[in-house]
Amino acid sequence: MTASRRRAVVVGAGIAGLGAALRLHQAGWEVVVAERTPSRRSGGYAVTFAGVGYDAAERMGILPELTERHITPDRMDYVRPDGRTRFSVPGPTVRAMVGDRSLNLLRGDIEDVLYQEVSRADTVQIRFGTTVAGIEQDTDGVDVTLDDGTVERADLLVGADGLHSATRRLVFGAEDDLRLDLNHMAGVFTLDTLPDGVEPGVTASLTDTGRTLAIVSLGGERAVAFFGYRTERPMDELADGPQVALPRAYADMGWVAPTVLEQLGGAESVYFDTISQMVVDRWSRGRVVLLGDAAWCVTLFAGFGSSLAVGGADALGAALERHADVPTALQAWEAEIRPEAERKQKLGRQVKGLYAPADPFRLWLRDLPLRLASYRPVSALLQRRLQLTS
Ligand SMILES: Cc1cc2nc3c(=O)[nH]c(=O)nc-3n(C[C@H](O)[C@H](O)[C@H](O)COP(=O)(O)OP(=O)(O)OC[C@H]3O[C@@H](n4cnc5c(N)ncnc54)[C@H](O)[C@@H]3O)c2cc1C
């Protein structure tokens, strides 16, 4: 370590935080990461990783490792409440629909790849079981008080602590004033036993009025159960928690819902949150910057959150390489990344009605492109197009 190395504190070791730690290390910075949980999270839900994140992963040198973790469903089945298949889209067609510069990954696998890279960096230290308790900045630096009593003096503080960011609350204002709820909830947990009727390697889903349940098979008996449903009172649902809210919303759904819900109590970790965006007029204040869901949270409706987290981290590192003055670098970074993040936020708001459609007609409309893709001639055409572009 050299005496002149610049120092950053990153709050949160999710995709955005680990991405920032890696990119800042590559830019020659020393980094302390404070992560609230006592150890690393694993698993999580499956995400499509494309666009700015894919390009950034290539530049950051992690694309080969991410590509190794890519999971392709053999087939996507859209089912009825009695379990019969309405229609299926073959795996190669799904692949053709998302394009060739795109990966299907578990959120935990993206974090894992970033974590492995960061662990090899001698200038990055990760402190688990630690959060931020106070932030004070002056013209020369920022003092970050952690809840273990230490005070870290740094040139930069990155708040990558997700939708309910403490960094944002301490510097930018109360969450309630900045959060735009899209009136849906998402719940995800890993299954140890594949429900009867769902084949290994297949992603199967049922959508009825206002709710979706999807089972994403990871091969063998392992699978992820994903719940997404409409609600007028997202914060009340959040307060009730998954053990109360998910059975209340899904007990009468049919298909595999009852057997999947039986695994909820014993699940290792359950993700359960509102589907909300953050509307923050500026993502930096002096030397404090927000990144990832803490800053924008485009939501799963837009489907680019992990991609923007990695792309945003890469752009942040590049801006700090270009501009010696930290506040100037943060403003340049925001000017570059905000248009894309706002485009994805807008997309998220536009498609939210399609996710768990409120009535059968909207469901039929939503499924039309997928139904078309399930027809053999269309399917073959899409697959041929992929072969031509790859
Ligand atoms: C069901 C679902 C499906 C999705 N699908 C896609 C998709 O297809 N494509 C896509 O690109 N994106 C998708 N996303 C979005 C994507 O997963 C997120 O945008 C991305 O993971 C955000 O990463 P993050 O690091 O900003 O936040 P987070 O993942 O929330 O990480 C924040 C980290 O900070 C830690 N933390 C929180 N508070 C504190 C604190 N006070 N102190 C210290 N640490 C703290 C947390 O423990 C966590 O480790 C999906 C999201 C969901 C929920």
Image (cartoon, helix red, strand yellow):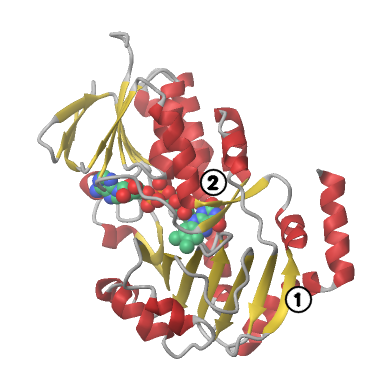
* Image quadrant occupied by the C terminus: top right
The correct choice, above or below, for 198 with respect to 119 in the image is below
The dot on residue 307 is 2
Q: Is residue 245 visible?
A: yes
- The residue lying at 27 percent from left, 62 percent from top is 176
Residue 110: where, in percent of width, then height?
A: 49, 44
Q: Tally the marks.
A: 2
> CB of residue at label 2: within 8 Å of ligand 1?
yes
Quick one: label 2, few (<14), some, or many (20+) residues within 10 Å?
A: many
Q: Residue furthest top?
A: 3
Which quadrant of the structure image shows residue 239?
Answer: bottom left
> Does residue 194 appear to the left or right of 368 in the view shown?
left
Q: Secondary structure at mark 1?
A: helix
* Image quadrant occupied by the N terminus: top left
Residue 301: where, in percent of width, then height?
A: 53, 64
- The residue lying at 45 percent from left, 41 percent from top is 112
Q: Secondary structure at mark 2?
A: helix
Q: CA distance from mark 1 to mark 2?
A: 28 Å
The correct choice, above or below, for 234 with respect to 316 in the image is below
Judging by the rendered image, the residue that carries numbered circle 1 is 371
The correct choice, above or below, for 326 with respect to 163 in the image is above
Quick one: label 1, few (<14), some, or many (20+) residues within 10 Å?
A: some
> Does residue 280 appear to the left or right of 103 in the view shown?
left
Hey, what amino acid is under mark 1? Answer: Arg
Q: Mark 1 and mark 2 in contact? Answer it, CB < 8 Å.
A: no
Q: Residue furthest left?
A: 149
The dot on residue 363 is none
> CB of residue at label 1: within 8 Å of ligand 1?
no
Between 52 and 68, the one lying in front of the other is 68
The correct choice, above or below, for 83 with respect to 100 in the image is below
Hey, what amino acid is under mark 2? Answer: Ser
